[in-house]
Amino acid sequence: REAEEKTVAIDKSQYKGVWVYVEQVDGHIRSVAHELIGEGRKLADAMGQELAGVLIGDNVENLAKDIFASGADKVYLVEGQEFKHYSTDAYTITLTDLINTYHPSVILMGATNDGRDLGPRVACRVGTGLTADCTNLGIDEATGLVAWTRPAFGGNIMATILCPEHRPQMGTVRPKVFKRPEQDFSRSGEIIRVSSKVKPEDIRTKLLEVIKVCTASCNLEEAEIIVSGGRGMCKPENFTLIEELATVLGGAVGASRAAVDAGWKPAIHQVGQTGKTVGPKIYFACGISGAIQHLAGMSSSDIVIAINKDPDAPIFKVADYGIVGDVLEVIPALIEEFKKI
Ligand code: FAD
């Protein structure tokens, strides 16, 4: 009801500009933020509006040049010690305040753990909707609104969603569905510094410790090479072959849902519709059949190399290179050859 009341009250013409929430961790901008700045640039140009990055953190002003280089015109910067690590309360209060003050028309966020936490809360507080986990963006010709596309009904249809009544139009977008733009460091822009309105009593959680479970081998979203294994690896011990090949190539380890469900790898490694969307330069699919839900997560890879003993496996339809053979013979041979390079 609160959202409906706000709808009646808002004047949509007040809402202008495309914003990208620039997620940073430990002072490093996540790749998805650059991907969204690239895509946001296209939307802003099509709408004839400005593109701004929203940067919240502790001592992060030095990141603004990176945001301009990717294509933003402005950066809204909010700094403070309370933003050193992501905190639901501090970030929600801050982004909500920025929206209520500056009235952007569109907000893009990465569908990361933080983005998935922050986006819906902020959308609710400003009385708008949110299209989660988008895999494409465009402009609806008839209305000029952002057309948010995402898989629905288990990936059987692609739903395109418009937000005609509320503002801002908000959505989270999966990492790696868009290419990272070329950066131009001769670009610059305006930094709008905004003071934090977060009071200590607003923060209802206390961060005791940060335990990093993710090593390079599970940083799938940023990896340039991914070696993934499926049920065809036959048993969990054989996953050491996947890990060894990934190590030799300096890549990350992926897994199909069948391998994750069998308990061979933790869910953090899962690639696919209900796992991660990845876009490496090279993707090895080892003992993976190529189910549509798996392809949904890796089809934007530049080069796909499939190893499968079944020559009719669907994965070969999307593979650039296919090796018909037993993973337990082919992978050791590849490891041996790559070690020589
Ligand atoms: P299988 O389909 O069993 O394929 C195993 C392959 O290994 C076969 O092609 C076989 O020929 C080959 N093989 C067997 N032994 C060998 C050997 N010794 N050498 C070489 N090849 C061998 N799946 C995902 O991966 N990610 C998701 O995010 C995901 N989300 C889903 C969401 C929904 C709503 C649903 C319904 C399903 C989802 N799935 C997902 C599951 C998906 O449909 C498949 O069941 C799954 O991807 C199959 O995994 P797989 O290819 O490892 O196993």
Image: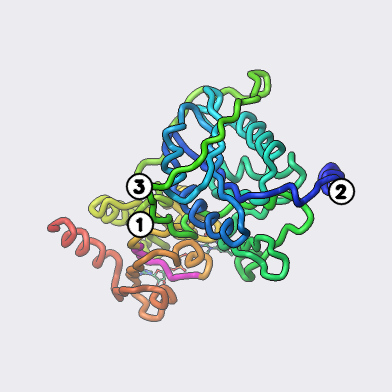
Residue 179 at x, y percent in the picture:
44, 59
* Label 2: which secondary element: helix
Residue 235 at x, y percent in the picture:
37, 58
The amino acid on which the numbered mark 1 sits, given as a three-letter code, is Ile
Left or right of 265 in this view: 102: right
Q: Earlier in the sequence, mark 1 or mark 3?
A: 3
Quarter of the image with the N terminus in it? top right
Left or right of 176 in this view: 146: right
Residue plotted at (74% across, 47% down): 14
Tell me the mark number nearer the camera, choosing from 3 and 2: 2
The alpha-carbon separation of the residues under discs 2 and 1 comes to: 49 Å
Q: Nearer the viewer, residue 148 or 50?
A: 50
The amino acid on which the numbered mark 2 sits, given as a three-letter code, is Val
The alpha-carbon separation of the residues under discs 1 and 3 comes to: 9 Å
- Residue lying at the far left in this picture: please name it: 340
For the magenta stretch, what is the residue range?
A: 283-291
Residue 326 at x, y percent in the picture:
29, 70
Residue at the spot of label 3: 217
Residue plotted at (53% across, 46% down): 112
On residue 226, which mark appears? 1
Q: Earlier in the sequence, mark 3 or mark 2?
A: 2
Tell me the mark number nearer the camera, choosing from 2 and 1: 2
The amino acid on which the numbered mark 3 sits, given as a three-letter code, is Ser
Residue 255 at x, y percent in the picture:
42, 57
Q: Nearer the viewer, residue 232 or 165?
A: 165
Asked if the residue under mark 3 is in contact with the one under mark 1, i.e. CB atoms within 8 Å, the reply is no
Residue at the spot of label 2: 8
* Label 3: which secondary element: helix
